[in-house]
Amino acid sequence: MKNASEFLSFSAEVAAARAAGTPIVALESTIISHGMPYPQNVQTAREVEAIIREGGAVPATIAVLGGKIRIGLSDEELELLGQSPEALKVSRRDLPYVLASGKIGATTVAATMICAALADIRVFVTGGIGGVHRGAETSFDISADLQELAQTSVAVVCAGAKSILDIGLTLEYLETHGVPVLSIGQDNFAAFYTPDSGFKADFRIDSAAEQAAFLQTKWALGLAGGVVISNPVPAEAAMPREEIERITAQALQEAASQGINGKAVTPFLLARIKALTEGRSLATNIALVKNNARAGASLAVALNRRC
Ligand code: PSU
Ligand code: MN
């Protein structure tokens, strides 16, 4: 039998960081393949990696290629993920399939957390997490990201969750599963395109050093599982709340009338929101991911100092 480490393959940069004890920040790849259009997706991925390096950490973008979990990608590999229509959206249940078949896989928050934990990386930066979808009481559509947060010990820096989701129910679900939700710079949980979801996060912790202390304490106690760190989009890059609400409602309506279901729901909604805002949502999306990269690099550096 193989063990997990035989599936891991590190880029030279990440391997060197591991050897030297340099802080490492994981990045997901579904945001590249299914979350943003080409070429902005690849451009953003590169810029986010650069921000993490400037912050004193090493970026590790994670994907599945050639039957391996790749921890750290080359420019050509980012390009492949950004352009290939064959890249599969890979969550927990899809990982064995994409690895065993040798196909191209872009990892979601859930799958990236699994791979980061296997690679001993504790800090992961993304845009928004999946959650409980509106209407989940009949559709049962609850992202596997939430179950992963319940069990896999990785901190996820994000700009909250999109209002395509039922944010109140998402927070209830996280509470039930013992997942702490920290917030940076404000008391409330962020709503991706807008800074304020209207719901309180559990704890406001602004400094990276104190966030690191929180993580270290949780995991030292044997409380396995993830932590959501909500970092609101900067005000100057946010979208008007009424506009995003109106467009979200329209996108949800279209998804329902076209019978979109399963793993296609989130990419469909993201693409429709982008189209309906004539690309303005994309600028917000890019700005918030970069903002998260700064926070994630600081956190990885602070956590590294404590360990
Ligand atoms: N939310 C976003 N942008 C994204 C995603 C979610 O605002 O790109 C992606 C992430 O990869 C996340 C996944 O893990 O969608 C969740 O998909 P689902 O809802 O099918 O679990
Ligand atoms: Mn779903």
Image: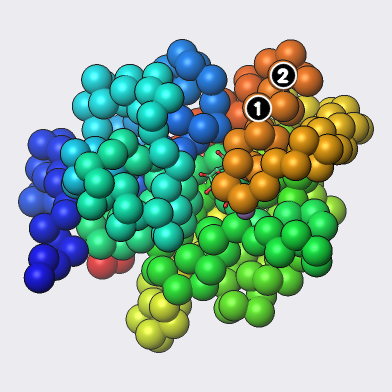
Which mark identifies residue 275?
2
> Which image quadrant is residue 182 in?
bottom right
Residue pictured at 35% horizontal, 40% vertical: 105
Q: Amino acid at mark 1?
A: Ala
Q: Please give left or right for residue 67 compared with residue 277 in the image.
A: left
**So how many labels did they put on this image?**
2
Q: Position of residue 128 (x, y in %)?
A: 59, 45
Q: Residues within 10 Å of mark 1 (few under 14, many from 20)?
A: some
> Which image quadrant is residue 242 in?
top right
The reply to whether dot 1 and dot 2 touch (C-beta < 8 Å) is: yes
Q: Amino acid at mark 2?
A: Ala
The residue that label 1 is drawn on is 271
Which residue is nearer to you in this view: 10 or 293? Answer: 10
Work out whether residue 196 can be spotted.
yes
Work out whether residue 69 can be spotted.
no
Q: Position of residue 48 (x, y in %)?
A: 41, 29
Quarter holding the N terminus? bottom left
Q: Gap in Å between the C-alphas at discs 1 and 2?
A: 6 Å
Q: Please give left or right for residue 165 compared with residue 49 in the image.
A: right
Q: Please give left or right for residue 24 compared with residue 263 in the image.
A: left
Q: Position of residue 81 (x, y in %)?
A: 36, 28
The answer to whether 12 is drawn above or below residue 176 in the figure is above
Residue pictured at 70% horizontal, 41% vertical: 260
Q: Secondary structure at mark 2?
A: helix
Q: How is the image coloured?
A: rainbow
The answer to whether 186 is drawn above or below residue 292 in the figure is below
Residue pictured at 36% horizontal, 81% vertical: 220
Which residue is nearer to you in this view: 206 or 119? Answer: 119
Label 1, ligand 1: CB separation under 8 Å:
no
Quarter holding the C terminus? bottom left
